[in-house]
Amino acid sequence: MKDIKLNNLDANQRRLLQIGVILILVLFLGLFYLFSRKSTPVVESNGVFLENSKLQVFNDTYEFKGYPDKILFHYPYFILVQGNKPLTTIYNLETREKVKEIQDVILDYYDENVVYNRKETFYNDKSLGEFCDSAFIKSTSEILCITKQSQNYADNRLISINPETPNLWKRLYQSDNILTTVSVINENLYIGEINLETKQNFLTVNENTLPVESTVNLIYQMGGTPYLGSFKSDLNENRISWYLIQGNEVIRQTGNKTLFFE
């Protein structure tokens, strides 16, 4: 009986067959990996919010317990200051991207311009001639600065400084209360205040002063509408809250989250 040939392929044909089998196997594994990823999608967060001590900034998560960490806001920039590192992380809310990290504690950032403290406060490389507790870049020619009238007293005031002529600063606002923060939204000037004797808090919008039940730590905008945020502190019964600013009203928002952007 003749032997039966099970494989009458020559060496080259067998090599091609082996290569074909390998390619089919690679294609199969690739498809399996692709479909397995689709079946377990990555959950992305498009919002920015604070819930208890969890600060969610898009897909990045931080622990935020308050001082020495700070949250700053100069739309479209969301700014997280981690004081102990020190490190400032800046996000662009419109592009939903991290802009940069600065190995320093800053007071404000806008379009590559930075305000920060040394022995005096600086706008980029120009000294403002004052030491600001809080600042806001209104324009390249006007920096708003909350500064003490004297280093020996807590009383402070809001002044306007042109970085080119810092000695010719202008006083914009002063009261019997301590000023906590400043912001400009839709051409309106917002100032947070607290009376240390009565523990009463206020929000001043242009020249109109409104009582607020919590400390004014942050004034920001969301969808063009102004809000204020209040973080945990001894002056605030260690609670987090946020408020809608609507005309002559400051309306507390419900829920467990302080929403900054959605």
Image (spheres, helix red, strand yellow):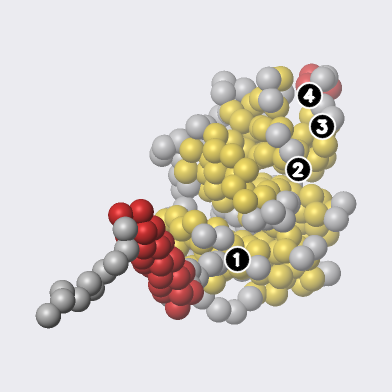
Give the CA distance from mark 4 to mark 1. 37 Å
N-terminal of the pair, mark 2 or mark 3, is 3
Residue 231 appears at what percent x and percent y? 53, 59
Q: Nearer the viewer, residue 16 or 61?
A: 16
**Where does residue 193 sit, x and y in percent of width and height?**
67, 53
Alpha carbon separation for disc pair 2 and 3? 23 Å
Q: Residue type at mark 3?
A: Thr
Q: Amino acid at mark 1?
A: Asn
Left or right: 70, with 261 as reference point? left
The residue at 82%/37% (across/down) is 139
Read off the residue under disc 2: 174
Which residue is the site of mark 4?
Answer: 163
For disc 3, the marked residue is: 140
Look at label 2 and name its amino acid. Answer: Gln
**Residue sitting at the far front:** 1
Residue picked out by circle 1: 46
**Whole-percent x and y of residue 13?**
36, 59
- Return the disc, 4 or 3, that comes first in the chain's sequence: 3
Q: Is residue 178 visible?
A: no
| Kind of residue sitting beneath label 4 | Pro
Q: Give the mark nearest the N terminus, 4 or 2.
A: 4
Left or right of 255 on screen, residue 12: left
> Where residue 176 appears, x then y in whole percent?
70, 47
Q: Whole-Å distance between the Cαs marked 4 and 2?
A: 21 Å
Dot 4, how many residues are within 10 Å of its Cα: few (below 14), some (14-19), or many (20+)? many
Cβ atoms under marks 4 and 3 closer than 8 Å: yes
